[in-house]
Image: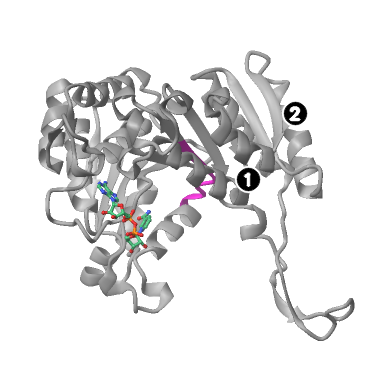
Amino acid sequence: MKIAVLPGDGIGTEITAQAVRVLKALALPMELEEAPVGGAAYDRLGDPLPESTLNLAKAADAILFGAVGGWQYDTQPRSKRPEQAVLGLRKHLGLFANLRPSIVYPELVNASTLKAEVVSGLDLLILRELTGDVYFGQPRGVRIAEDGPFKGQREGFDTMRYAEGEIRRIMHVGFAAARKRGKKLCSVDKANVLETMQLWKDVAADVAREYPDVAFSSMYVDNAAMQLIRNPKQFDVMVTGNMFGDILSDEASMLTGSIGMQPSASLNESSKGLYEPIHGSAPDIAGKNLANPLATILSAAMMLRYSFDKDEAAGRIESAVRKVLAQGLRTADIYEAGTTKVGTVEMGDAVLKAL
Ligand code: NAD
């Protein structure tokens, strides 16, 4: 198991250090190699995604990514900004499947803005297609309207586009994940209005026939947005396109209430993946031992499950995280009265001990 460790900027270095300690403690046959990315790479090598880092990422079986970005880079030309590294890695590695679990731990049930009974026990996986859809479809642009009531004015246009094979491959990732979980999959579309989405719906139903052990359903995206708030526990795995997934996955992240708890994975066709917390580099708390490392530690667990098929080891990490929460240990972002506030390193220590 070759793992490229790309800590990045801000709290990125602090949180990946804790995840690396946890991975090493499992004593599995793995090689970890670190490289700079984002602002740290720009400062050292003049490029947010240097060739040496990209080559390491390409040669690895999986990538553990911290976060990139910082105020000092906000005035740079776009191509030199730290965030370009994430887009570059997605593109070069063909990471088309973005998995975002939303799990509500019993101890953190009050962290959500929703009523406890709505979210308690929630364990939802949103799977977002990451490399297609209206975000990448051509043609796109701004032109002068040639007819209609707004003739002569500027009009913006984008193209929603999905090839059948693109829909099939994301559905297979979704059904494979559902088989390892609650065995339910809901495909989200807008087939009542959009041709692309009618194809999405038809192909999803077709792939579903190959997985008779998984209960399959389809839902329109507007209804799905409403159902996620009304009764999120009805869902197990939700599979959707790039744009709808962008919106629904952020909506779902708020069900759990805490950005410092949420891991993610982005996979390519050979299950190579980039694993990262959903949050950014948090420059406001960087270097202060305040960051919650649990999202990154849980991302490492996802790595073991999805890139290496090591469900047991992944489960051990997840149980260790549950245990430290049950012990009442909290970083500042999830702290509430009656619990014990700890720093980044102490949280890492506690997870190691529980492991
Ligand atoms: P952010 O996610 O970094 O921070 C938002 C808020 O959440 C801040 O108050 C921060 O202190 C807090 N927070 C985030 N992670 C935390 C953790 N693990 N523990 C405790 N608190 C945490 O978002 P932002 O402030 O909008 O962006 C900061 C920088 O990160 C920007 O440069 C942005 O472009 C970048 N960014 C990078 C990624 C990525 O690397 N994938 C993702 C999002 C944002």
Question: What is the quadrant of the C terminus in the image?
Answer: top left
Front one among 15 and 283 = 283
* N-term-proximal mark, 1 vs 2: 2
Q: Is mark 1 within 8 Å of ligand 1?
A: no
The answer to whether any part of residue 272 appears in the image is no
Residue farthest to the top, as pictured:
213
Residue behind mark 2: 205
Front one among 141 and 309 = 141
Give coordinates of residue 250: x percent, y percent: 48, 46
Magenta part of the protein: which range? Answer: 93-100
Rendered image quadrant of residue 354: top left
Front one among 110 and 123 = 110
**Tag 1: residue type?**
Gly
Front one among 279 and 58 = 279
Q: CA distance from mark 1 to mark 2?
A: 15 Å
Give coordinates of residue 145: x percent, y percent: 81, 80
- Look at the image and say whether residue 94 sits in the magenta stretch: yes
Q: Which mark is residue 241?
A: 1
86 left or right of 352 in image = right
Question: What is the quadrant of the N terminus in the image?
Answer: top left
**Tag 2: residue type?**
Ala
312 left or right of 94 in image = left
Residue 253 higher or lower than 66, as above or below: above
- Look at the image and say whether residue 340 sits in the magenta stretch: no
Graded by Cα atoms within 10 Å as few (under 14), some (14 to 19) or many (20 or more), the crowding at tag 1 reads: many
Give coordinates of residue 36: x percent, y percent: 25, 58
Pointer 1 with pointer 2, Cβ within 8 A: no
